[in-house]
Amino acid sequence: MARLAKSTFTERPWRIHEFTSDFAVEDVWAFRTPGAGPGDFPAMLTAMRVSGGLARQPLLVRFLFAARWKLGALLGWDEPAAGFGARVVSLRDRLPGDLRDAPRGEDSDAMPLKGVYELPTESARELANKTVHTVMHLGWVRGADGDHELRMTVLVKPNGRWGRLYMAAIAPFRYVVVYPALTREWERAWRDRHDLAARHGEGA
Protein backbone atom coordinates (compact mmCIF):
# COMPACT_ATOMS: atom_id res chain seq x y z
CA MET A 1 0.00 0.00 0.00
CA ALA A 2 1.19 3.51 -0.81
CA ARG A 3 -0.38 6.78 0.23
CA LEU A 4 -0.88 9.05 -2.77
CA ALA A 5 -1.35 12.77 -3.30
CA LYS A 6 -4.99 13.86 -3.35
CA SER A 7 -4.47 15.16 -6.88
CA THR A 8 -4.11 11.57 -8.12
CA PHE A 9 -7.83 11.27 -7.40
CA THR A 10 -9.11 14.75 -8.16
CA GLU A 11 -7.38 14.97 -11.55
CA ARG A 12 -8.84 11.74 -12.91
CA PRO A 13 -12.23 11.79 -14.69
CA TRP A 14 -14.09 9.65 -12.18
CA ARG A 15 -17.88 9.83 -12.38
CA ILE A 16 -18.11 10.47 -8.65
CA HIS A 17 -16.79 14.02 -9.14
CA GLU A 18 -20.13 14.92 -10.72
CA PHE A 19 -22.04 14.83 -7.41
CA THR A 20 -19.59 15.06 -4.49
CA SER A 21 -18.36 18.65 -4.73
CA ASP A 22 -19.40 19.22 -1.09
CA PHE A 23 -17.16 16.38 0.16
CA ALA A 24 -13.48 16.67 1.07
CA VAL A 25 -10.84 14.15 0.02
CA GLU A 26 -9.46 12.59 3.21
CA ASP A 27 -7.12 9.84 1.97
CA VAL A 28 -5.93 8.27 -1.29
CA TRP A 29 -4.18 4.89 -1.23
CA ALA A 30 -2.89 2.45 -3.84
CA PHE A 31 -2.86 -1.33 -3.33
CA ARG A 32 -0.56 -3.79 -5.09
CA THR A 33 -2.30 -6.13 -7.55
CA PRO A 34 0.56 -7.69 -9.55
CA GLY A 35 -0.36 -8.98 -12.98
CA ALA A 36 -3.69 -7.16 -13.04
CA GLY A 37 -5.10 -6.07 -16.39
CA PRO A 38 -7.59 -3.38 -17.41
CA GLY A 39 -10.59 -5.71 -17.17
CA ASP A 40 -9.84 -7.18 -13.75
CA PHE A 41 -11.70 -4.70 -11.54
CA PRO A 42 -14.80 -6.94 -11.15
CA ALA A 43 -12.53 -9.85 -10.15
CA MET A 44 -10.88 -7.63 -7.55
CA LEU A 45 -14.25 -6.59 -6.09
CA THR A 46 -15.34 -10.22 -5.94
CA ALA A 47 -12.13 -11.24 -4.19
CA MET A 48 -12.53 -8.45 -1.64
CA ARG A 49 -16.15 -9.40 -1.00
CA VAL A 50 -15.46 -13.08 -0.31
CA SER A 51 -12.12 -12.72 1.47
CA GLY A 52 -13.63 -12.70 4.95
CA GLY A 53 -13.92 -9.02 5.81
CA LEU A 54 -13.70 -7.92 9.42
CA ALA A 55 -13.86 -11.49 10.74
CA ARG A 56 -10.37 -12.19 9.33
CA GLN A 57 -8.80 -9.01 10.65
CA PRO A 58 -6.32 -9.07 13.56
CA LEU A 59 -7.71 -8.94 17.08
CA LEU A 60 -6.74 -5.29 17.55
CA VAL A 61 -8.67 -4.21 14.45
CA ARG A 62 -11.74 -6.17 15.54
CA PHE A 63 -11.45 -4.65 19.00
CA LEU A 64 -11.30 -1.11 17.60
CA PHE A 65 -14.38 -1.64 15.45
CA ALA A 66 -16.26 -3.27 18.33
CA ALA A 67 -15.36 -0.35 20.58
CA ARG A 68 -16.51 2.12 17.93
CA TRP A 69 -19.89 0.41 17.52
CA LYS A 70 -20.32 0.17 21.30
CA LEU A 71 -19.50 3.85 21.74
CA GLY A 72 -21.82 4.73 18.88
CA ALA A 73 -24.64 2.79 20.51
CA LEU A 74 -24.11 4.54 23.86
CA LEU A 75 -23.99 8.02 22.31
CA GLY A 76 -26.64 7.47 19.64
CA TRP A 77 -24.27 8.09 16.74
CA ASP A 78 -25.72 5.32 14.59
CA GLU A 79 -29.43 5.73 15.26
CA PRO A 80 -31.65 5.66 12.15
CA ALA A 81 -32.56 9.33 12.68
CA ALA A 82 -28.90 10.23 12.17
CA GLY A 83 -28.51 8.32 8.92
CA PHE A 84 -29.93 8.27 5.41
CA GLY A 85 -33.41 9.54 4.81
CA ALA A 86 -33.41 11.65 7.96
CA ARG A 87 -30.35 13.87 8.49
CA VAL A 88 -28.50 12.82 5.33
CA VAL A 89 -29.51 12.43 1.69
CA SER A 90 -27.93 9.35 0.13
CA LEU A 91 -25.70 9.79 -2.87
CA ARG A 92 -28.11 7.44 -4.65
CA ASP A 93 -30.53 10.38 -4.77
CA ARG A 94 -27.93 12.56 -6.53
CA LEU A 95 -26.96 10.14 -9.28
CA PRO A 96 -27.33 11.02 -12.96
CA GLY A 97 -29.87 8.89 -14.77
CA ASP A 98 -27.38 6.47 -16.29
CA LEU A 99 -25.72 5.77 -12.94
CA ARG A 100 -29.09 5.14 -11.29
CA ASP A 101 -29.43 2.20 -13.66
CA ALA A 102 -25.95 0.84 -12.81
CA PRO A 103 -25.51 -2.04 -10.34
CA ARG A 104 -25.02 -0.99 -6.72
CA GLY A 105 -22.93 -3.94 -5.58
CA GLU A 106 -23.90 -6.40 -2.88
CA ASP A 107 -24.78 -5.14 0.61
CA SER A 108 -24.60 -7.15 3.79
CA ASP A 109 -24.95 -6.63 7.54
CA ALA A 110 -21.21 -7.25 7.85
CA MET A 111 -20.46 -4.27 5.56
CA PRO A 112 -21.62 -0.98 7.11
CA LEU A 113 -20.89 0.96 3.90
CA LYS A 114 -23.75 0.54 1.44
CA GLY A 115 -23.40 0.39 -2.32
CA VAL A 116 -23.96 3.50 -4.46
CA TYR A 117 -22.84 2.21 -7.87
CA GLU A 118 -20.41 -0.18 -9.57
CA LEU A 119 -18.90 0.41 -13.00
CA PRO A 120 -16.20 -1.49 -14.93
CA THR A 121 -13.42 0.66 -13.43
CA GLU A 122 -14.88 2.36 -10.35
CA SER A 123 -17.34 1.89 -7.52
CA ALA A 124 -18.60 3.81 -4.51
CA ARG A 125 -20.03 2.90 -1.13
CA GLU A 126 -21.28 5.24 1.60
CA LEU A 127 -22.01 5.46 5.31
CA ALA A 128 -23.80 8.17 7.28
CA ASN A 129 -24.18 8.66 11.02
CA LYS A 130 -24.30 11.53 13.50
CA THR A 131 -20.61 12.33 13.06
CA VAL A 132 -19.97 12.15 9.32
CA HIS A 133 -21.17 11.21 5.84
CA THR A 134 -18.34 9.25 4.26
CA VAL A 135 -17.78 7.66 0.87
CA MET A 136 -15.29 4.96 -0.09
CA HIS A 137 -14.42 5.24 -3.77
CA LEU A 138 -12.54 2.39 -5.43
CA GLY A 139 -10.87 2.93 -8.78
CA TRP A 140 -8.92 0.76 -11.20
CA VAL A 141 -5.87 2.52 -12.61
CA ARG A 142 -2.80 1.56 -14.61
CA GLY A 143 0.22 1.86 -12.33
CA ALA A 144 3.78 2.91 -13.06
CA ASP A 145 4.87 -0.71 -13.60
CA GLY A 146 2.27 -1.28 -16.33
CA ASP A 147 -0.04 -3.45 -14.21
CA HIS A 148 -3.38 -2.10 -13.06
CA GLU A 149 -3.81 -1.38 -9.36
CA LEU A 150 -6.61 -0.73 -6.92
CA ARG A 151 -6.93 2.77 -5.52
CA MET A 152 -9.11 3.68 -2.57
CA THR A 153 -10.18 7.23 -1.84
CA VAL A 154 -12.04 8.25 1.30
CA LEU A 155 -14.33 11.27 0.92
CA VAL A 156 -15.88 12.89 3.98
CA LYS A 157 -18.43 15.50 4.96
CA PRO A 158 -18.19 15.91 8.75
CA ASN A 159 -21.30 16.88 10.69
CA GLY A 160 -20.20 20.19 12.19
CA ARG A 161 -17.46 20.79 14.71
CA TRP A 162 -18.04 17.48 16.49
CA GLY A 163 -17.68 15.58 13.24
CA ARG A 164 -14.37 17.30 12.50
CA LEU A 165 -13.09 16.46 15.97
CA TYR A 166 -14.16 12.85 15.51
CA MET A 167 -12.27 12.55 12.20
CA ALA A 168 -9.15 14.04 13.79
CA ALA A 169 -9.40 11.67 16.76
CA ILE A 170 -9.62 8.49 14.69
CA ALA A 171 -6.92 9.46 12.16
CA PRO A 172 -4.01 7.84 14.10
CA PHE A 173 -5.93 4.57 14.41
CA ARG A 174 -6.70 4.54 10.67
CA TYR A 175 -3.09 5.12 9.66
CA VAL A 176 -1.36 2.89 12.23
CA VAL A 177 -3.82 0.00 12.60
CA VAL A 178 -6.77 -0.10 10.21
CA TYR A 179 -5.21 0.77 6.84
CA PRO A 180 -2.19 -1.56 7.20
CA ALA A 181 -4.53 -4.42 8.13
CA LEU A 182 -6.85 -3.57 5.23
CA THR A 183 -3.87 -3.58 2.89
CA ARG A 184 -2.83 -7.07 3.96
CA GLU A 185 -6.39 -8.37 3.49
CA TRP A 186 -7.03 -6.81 0.07
CA GLU A 187 -3.62 -7.61 -1.39
CA ARG A 188 -3.95 -11.19 -0.12
CA ALA A 189 -7.43 -11.33 -1.65
CA TRP A 190 -5.97 -10.45 -5.04
CA ARG A 191 -3.23 -13.08 -4.77
CA ASP A 192 -5.73 -15.74 -3.65
CA ARG A 193 -8.61 -14.64 -5.91
CA HIS A 194 -8.84 -17.88 -7.90
CA ASP A 195 -8.98 -20.05 -4.78
CA LEU A 196 -11.49 -17.68 -3.16
CA ALA A 197 -13.70 -17.68 -6.24
CA ALA A 198 -13.64 -21.48 -6.49
CA ARG A 199 -14.46 -21.80 -2.80
CA HIS A 200 -17.47 -19.50 -3.13
CA GLY A 201 -18.58 -20.64 -6.56
CA GLU A 202 -17.90 -17.30 -8.27
CA GLY A 203 -15.99 -16.43 -11.43
CA ALA A 204 -12.65 -14.58 -11.25
Image: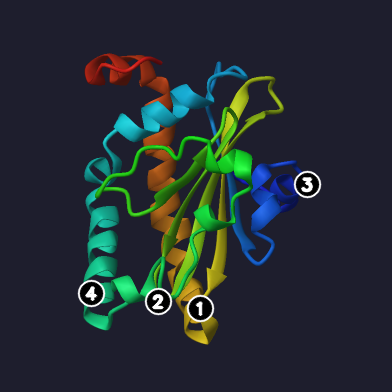
Mark 4 and mark 2: Cα distance apart in space? 11 Å
Residue 131 found in image quarter: bottom left
Along the horizontal axis of the image, is 61 left or right of 122? left
Secondary element under disc 4, as helix, strand or loop, is: helix
What amino acid type should be assigned to the residue bearing mark 4? Ala
Judging depth in this view, the residue of 25 and 108 nearest the camera is 108
Q: Amino acid at mark 2?
A: Lys
Q: Amino acid at mark 1?
A: Asn
Quarter of the image where the C terminus is located: top left
Q: Which residue is mark 2?
A: 130
* Amino acid at dot 3: Glu
Distance in Å between CA atoms under marks 3 and 4: 38 Å
Return the residue at label 1.
159
Give x and y (percent) for residue 173: 41, 63
* Residue 24's disc number: none
> Circle 3 sits on which residue?
11
Q: Earlier in the sequence, mark 3 or mark 4?
A: 3
Q: Which residue is mark 4?
A: 73
Q: Nearer the viewer, residue 103 or 66?
A: 103
Which of the two marks, 3 or 1, is nearer to us in this view? 1
In the current view of this chain or complex, which residue is farthest to the front?
Answer: 97
As measured in the structure, the alpha-carbon distance from the residue carrying label 2 to the one carrying label 1 is 7 Å
Q: Residues within 10 Å of mark 1 (few under 14, many from 20)?
A: some
